[in-house]
Amino acid sequence: MKYVGMQTQISRNNMLSVLLLLMFPVIILGMVWVFLALLNYFGGGYYDEYGSVVHQLDADTVNYYFITTIPWVILGVLVWFVIAYYSNVRMIQAATGARPLSRRDNPRVYNIVENLCMTCNMDMPQINVVDDDQLNAFASGIDKKSYTVTVTTGLLNLLTDEELAGVLGHELTHIRNHDTKLLITSIIFVGIISTVMSLVVRMMYNMMWYGGGRSGRNGEKNGLSVIVIMLIGVVCCAIAYFFTLVTRFAISRKREYMADAGGAELCGNPLALASALRKISGNPGLDDVKRADVAQLFIIQPDEMEQGLMSFMNSLFSTHPDTEKRIQILEQF
């Protein structure tokens, strides 16, 4: 019997994936227009009768260059997204250090996953393992060929069969609900935004030092270059961070509660999953990943990722609910 709310969750995740696909080109093109507008405004200008520099935005020129760049931007982003979308398995494996696990390597894990899949009538996913003495697990993939459940060696060594079944049922529910497809889409989008932002800032930095001062008034020209770099950097950072927040808003914390409920039903023992979450929260692994986007996949985010200047904002917009609340709900079943 399917647990209550599964089809609603699947439909919601599919809708959000489509919205992200539609929203992303708009954000990229908006960044391009702002970039061209700032270059036009600060890169031109003239001296008035008092010798002061007067800047003026030539909207027609900006729009002309913007229109000519639209096809190239869309093509570049599309190619980049397709490559990243279909190579997400290798990307996540490289970030986490995961390796495939066969039945021969660990019959215990393989048999538990196989039995759970038979219970919910789903295809067997790939099973990966990360050599980490700490505890964590996650699901990933976008289709039947790429769906993967990954666990750490510490998780396998510490959890009982019942607890491990609860964790694996949780991850299988993420796959069934299409949570992984939504998360992979958001990871790729944020990655592209961050990379574009870094390239723009680096390009402007190089222009300032190697080509920004070749004019009649070097001091003023270099001063303007610094201003341009600062403005573009601030705007790009703001847009990138805004997109990250929007993505985190889209990825509701309810998906973890839904996955907990599905995992509890699959393993038939909510208290076992609650016990597993308590053990994992005491020593969550995969803290060497150092990528908050990939950490969205983990059943519990490592404590190290909550440190730093942005710890308050990260917790405010976290995609994971409080672990203790999840445990309390499971114990009420």
Image: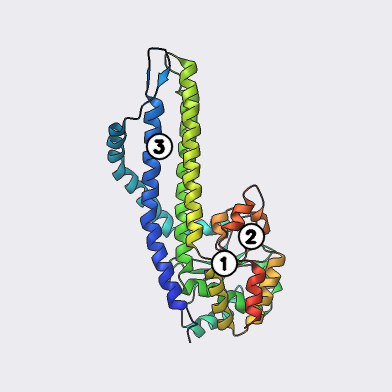
Amino acid beneath label 1: Phe
Labelled disc at residue 35: 3
| Image: 244 above or below 53 | below
Q: Quadrant of residue 296?
A: bottom right
Query: Residue beneath label 1, please?
Result: 138
> The residue under label 2 is which amino acid type?
Leu
Q: Amino acid at mark 3?
A: Phe
* Mark 3 nearby-residue class (10 Å; few <14, some 14–19, many ≥20): many
Furthest residue toward front: 50
Residue 7 location in percent, x, y?
43, 77
Above or below, 21 against 128 in this view is above
Tell me whether the residue at label 3 lies in contact with that at label 1, contact meaning CB atoms closer than 8 angstroms: no
Residue at image position (45%, 20%) is 221
Q: Is residue 12 left or right of residue 256?
A: left
Q: CA distance from mark 2 to mark 1?
A: 10 Å
Which residue occupies the foreground of this view, 48 or 5?
48
Horizontal and vertical percent position of residue 43: 39, 26
Using residue 257 as the reference point, say whether residue 239 is left or right of it.
Answer: left
Secondary element under disc 1, as helix, strand or loop, is: strand
Residue corresponding to mark 2: 286
Q: Which element is circle 2 on?
A: loop
Q: Is residue 126 left or right of residue 283?
A: left
Q: Residue at x 52, y 70 (%)?
A: 255
